[in-house]
Structures are given as C-alpha cells and as structure tokens.
Image (cartoon, rainbow, N blue to C red):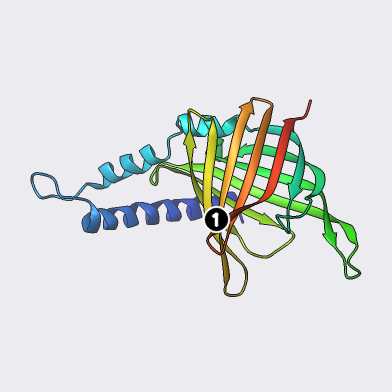
Amino acid sequence: MSHVKKLNCFSAVLMSLVISLSSFAEDKVAPKKDDKPASDAEMTAMMMDMAKLGENHKLLASGVGTWNYVVKWWMDPSAAPSESTGVAVTKEVMGGRYFISDHTGKMQMPGADGKMMDMEFKGMSTEGYDNAKKKFVSSWIDNMGTGIVLSEGTYDVATKSFTYRAEYEMMPGVKTKTREVIKIADKDHRMIEFYEDRGGTEVKTMEIKYARKG
C-alpha cells in the first residue's frame, strides 16, 4: 500500500470514529441545559482525554525489562507442584498505553506413558489501564491452547498488589473462574499467585516468582 493510500485509509478510519462518537453522543450523552447534545468538538475532546496517560500507566511501566522467572503449578493441589524456569521480556507499545510481555521457557507435562516430559512453552500478555472502565485490563495467549483469556483488575496501594479476575473456557462447556494476584516486592522482584474456582472452592494452582535480569 502506498504512503498516500495509507494516509487516506487512516483519515477514513478517524472520520468514521468521529462520526460514530457524534452518533453516540446524540443517543447516550445527557443533554445540557439548553437540551443540545454534545458537539463534535466536545466529543473529540472527550476522546482525546480518554487517550491520556496517567499514574496507572506509569505503574504498569515499572514492569518493563527482562525477567527470569520460576513457575510452580499444581494439577492436583494435594500433590507436590511441578516446577520450571523461563524468561519474560516486557515492552511498552502505543506510547506507553499498553505493555506486552513475551514468556519463553519449558513446562513439564505428563506424557502418554505417564512420565513427565519437557515441552517448549511460549506465552504472551497485553496489559493496560482502561480510562473509560477505570480498570486494569489484560489478555493472555499461549501455545498450550487456542483461546484468549481476558481479565480486568484493580490495584491496592497498601499491599502493592494487582488483583485480576477472569473466566475462561478451556474445554467446550467447561468455564472456570480465576483470580490472579500480582505482588510487587520491589522494583526488581514480583510474584504472581493464580487461583481457580473449583466447584465453589478456590484453589491455588500456580505461582510465578520474577527477578529482574541484570
């Protein structure tokens, strides 16, 4: 696609967005004292305000860098956990509005003969703070499935921890609610605890400890 065509395409998308926002304003935005809906300029200003970076984006930016991690997970909570290691690289995109983390490592999984075997693991998360929802948002994909896990969360200043909640469907008709707690020990150390709701009882199924590399 030529540079001119790209610009024309971008302009068309932007114009469509402005028109959509104007239409939304007519239907959803409360009228002013003179009973007139918000103007195009006001809606554009609102859109630009929603795109601003804030303290919550800076909070996520503290995770940028390369991290070594050790992960433990329990297929059976009453049994000893499996353990493996890997590396996670977190980068900011879209001017610091989102943060993408690439995870690579090994996972021990039971083979057909019942013995544990090493499998290559790749995973990727995207995190951000949604100014409209006033919530942290996250997505997760990996090479162990084909679904996308979407979660929303909050941050507690007192405990320096994020709490994300999600519901995913690993198998048809089997939905699982999850809770993920990210604890920030200091700028170079953090830990994730992952819990699943199993029949109304919450069970810890995974723990990941991160240490900044270098």
Q: Would you identify the image quadrant in which residue 46 lies?
A: top left
How packed mark 1 is, by other alpha carbons closer than 10 Å (few <14, some 14-19, many 20 or more), is some
* Left or right for 139, reference 205: left
Residue 177 position, x and y percent, is 54, 59
Residue 5 can be seen in this image: no
Which picture quadrant has residue 174?
A: bottom right
| Residue, disc 1 | 150
Quadrant for the N terminus in the image: bottom right
Q: Is residue 174 above or below residue 149?
A: below
Compared to residue 131, the image places residue 16 above or below, namely below
Q: Residue at x 49, y 51 (%)?
A: 10
Q: Amino acid at mark 1?
A: Leu
Residue at screen point 43% across, 55% down:
12
Q: Position of residue 102 (x, y in %)?
A: 71, 45
Taking 26 as reference, is 189 above or below it? above
Q: Nearer the viewer, residue 38 or 81?
A: 81
Question: Please, what secondary structure does the residue beneath circle 1 have?
Answer: strand
Residue found at the far bottom of this picture? 172
Task: Indicate the position of residue 34 as horizontal and vertical percent values.
Answer: 8, 46
Q: Nearer the viewer, residue 204 or 170?
A: 204
Give the residue at x 88% y 66%: 114
Residue 84 location (% of width, % of height): 82, 46
Q: Is residue 67 above or below residue 114?
A: above
